[in-house]
Amino acid sequence: MTFSFHKMHGLGNDFIVLDARKNPIQMNPALAQALSNRHTGIGCDQLIIIGNGKNQADVSMEIWNADGSEVEACGNATRCVPVFLGRDVIISTAAGLLDARLSDEGACVDMGRPRLSWDEIPLAYAMDTLSMPVAWEDLKEPTAVNMGNPHVVFVVDDVDAVDFGRLGNIIEHDQLFPERINVNIVMVTGKNHLKMRTWERGAGLTRACGTGACATFVAAKRRRLISGKTQIDLPGGRLVLDENSEGHIIMRGPATYVFKGEADWASFS
Ligand SMILES: N[C@@H](CCC[C@H](N)C(=O)O)C(=O)O
């Protein structure tokens, strides 16, 4: 039996989008991994399933990493949903309701309030989350932030000089992080201007991570490296981050529809 899929991306963080509003889709880790595989499947960083919303939500969104793990939040995919549907939407996710609107750049989304205490990240034991007393070689004293999903943010002198493909993987799997972790490195490039890279839990190095940009904005603000609305440059392009009067993190940036394809479920079983 065949199915339709849509390829989208947010700054090169790429997604297979399945529209399950008419016909529900029962995903599982093995199937998500098979579809995401860039050699034997369709290929993506994350698999996104859009379903029908309940109560205040217009639609629901499931997020599966390329390694087959189901996760709570994806900032770039959240921007893709209003672009896919061609209208502003309230999206229900495992991390709560998100307000996503069309904007000049693509989309503007309210990613909610960050959570900052050690057990909300979560970490394996109690510690300060602003400057964690830990280090992995030259990556030291990160700030931890939960944006619906768990992140650590390291401030470095030069994001391009870090052996991030090796260190990101080691940190993601450290026993300090019982649910694993998304790892971000950031440098200050100007007033309210940052440059960052992300090693994503369950996907590795990506061109951009929306929740990573939100977590990095929060960490940089907590460390007084920035003072307000901030431009963040990622390998795939630029996002603009701000905080509203309720302490919610607001992210603006592109979201791109690439193509619609057809595939056969039998190829992935
Ligand atoms: N690419 C996403 C984040 C996807 C989930 C993440 N890898 C996790 O495991 O939490 C984004 O744009 O935020």
Image (spheres, helix red, strand yellow):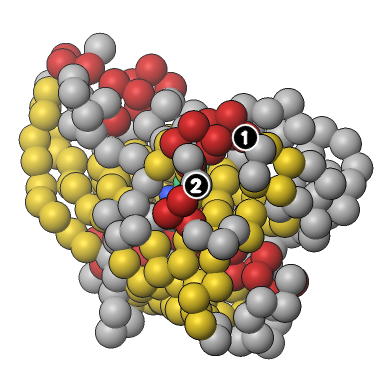
The kind of residue on which mark 1 rests is Ile
Q: Name the residue under label 2.
A: 162
Identify the disc placed on residue 228.
none
Q: Can residue 233 be seen in this view?
A: yes
Q: Is residue 9 above or below residue 46?
A: below
Residue 269 image position (x, y, % from top left)? 25, 12
Residue appearing at x 18%, y 31% in the figure: 42
Between 17 and 90, the one lying in front of the other is: 17
Q: Is residue 129 left or right of residue 106?
A: right
Q: Name the residue under label 1.
A: 171
Residue appearing at x 68%, y 65% in the figure: 219
Residue appearing at x 35%, y 24% in the figure: 33
The kind of residue on which mark 2 rests is Val
Closer to the N terminus: mark 2 or mark 1? 2
Q: Residue 175 sits in which quadrant?
A: top right
Helix, strand or loop at label 2? It is loop
Q: In this view, does 226 lie to the left or right of 90?
A: right
Image quadrant in which the N terminus is located: top left
Q: In this view, does 189 lie to the left or right of 237?
A: right
Q: Residue 36 sits in which quadrant?
A: top left
Q: Report the mark closest to the observer, 2 or 1.
A: 2
